[in-house]
Image (cartoon, rainbow, N blue to C red):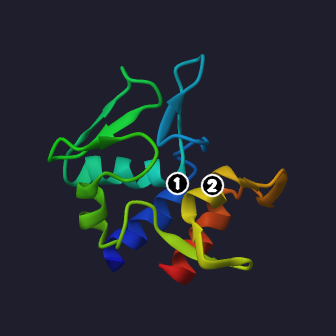
């Protein structure tokens, strides 16, 4: 991962500027407040540094990168490339997962066979995972 982007992402997650949300890159609550998953925070940083935009007209707050690629649950390819990541949902080590677990699973929680395998983590906990593993 690009070390400058990594630093920005960790700082943003720890800043308390972003309210944490689940399941989508960005959602809006009944009061019009935005809530971001950890990947949504990275998309927002991309928008500030490179461009792109949020399309809240569509369900789940789609993010559209500079190339016009959009998604609402994983990173569009422009964000992946800018951040120096290998895929649209980076993984970090997790016991019981041979190839690791998606960072979004730590944000949202992960249920397997009726049992919670990964509990939702705070932005502070996710920032630590990013620092240690990406």
Relative image position of residue 12 (x, y in whole percent): 47, 57
- Residue 20: quadrant of the picture: top right
- Residue located at (54% from left, 27% from top): 33
Total marks shown come to 2
Furthest toward the front, the residue is: 113
Is label 1 in a helix, a strand or a loop? helix
Q: Residue at x 41, y 72 (%)?
A: 7
Disc 2 is placed on an element classified as helix
- Residue 126, image x and y in percent? 61, 65
Q: Quadrant of the N terminus?
A: bottom left
Mark 2 packing: few (<14 Cα in 10 Å), some, or many (20+)?
Answer: many
- Circle 2 sits on which residue? 107
Mark 2 and mark 1 residues within 8 Å of each other at the beta carbon? yes
Name the residue tied to disc 1. 38
Q: Is residue 68 above or below residue 121?
A: above
Between disc 2 and disc 1, whose residue precedes?
1
Question: 113 or 14, which lies in front?
Answer: 113
Q: Is residue 94 above or below residue 48?
A: below
| Residue at 23 percent of width and 56 percent of height | 78
Residue at the (40%, 55%) spot, across then down: 42
Query: Where is 129 relative to 20, above or below?
Result: below
Q: For the view shown, which residue lies furthest in the left direction? A: 67
Mark 1: few, some, or many residues within 10 Å (few <14, many ≥20)? Answer: many
Residue 70: % across, % down: 29, 41
| Furthest residue in direction right, as rendered | 115
- Is 123 positioned to the left or the right of 86 in the image? right
Residue 25 in the image, given as x and y percentages of width and height: 47, 43
Residue 41 in the image: above or below residue 80: above
60 and 8: which one is in front? 60
Please give left or right for residue 92 compared with residue 84 in the image: right
Please state if 9 lies on the left or on the right of 4 as rendered.
Answer: right
């Amino acid at each position: 991962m690009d070390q400058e982007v990594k630093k920005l992402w960790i700082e943003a997650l720890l800043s308390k500027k972003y309210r944490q949300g689940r399941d989508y890159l960005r959602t809006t609550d009944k009061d019009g407040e935005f809530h971001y998953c950890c990947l949504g925070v990275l998309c927002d940083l991309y928008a500030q540094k490179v461009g792109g935009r949020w399309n809240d007209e569509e369900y789940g707050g789609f993010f559209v990168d500079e190339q016009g690629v959009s998604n609402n649950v994983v990173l569009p390819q422009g964000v992946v490339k800018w951040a120096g990541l290998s895929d649209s949902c980076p993984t970090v080590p997790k016991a019981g997962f041979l190839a690791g677990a998606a960072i979004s699973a730590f944000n949202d929680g992960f249920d397997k066979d009726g049992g919670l395998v990964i509990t939702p983590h705070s932005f502070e906990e996710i920032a630590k995972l990013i620092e240690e593993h990406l």
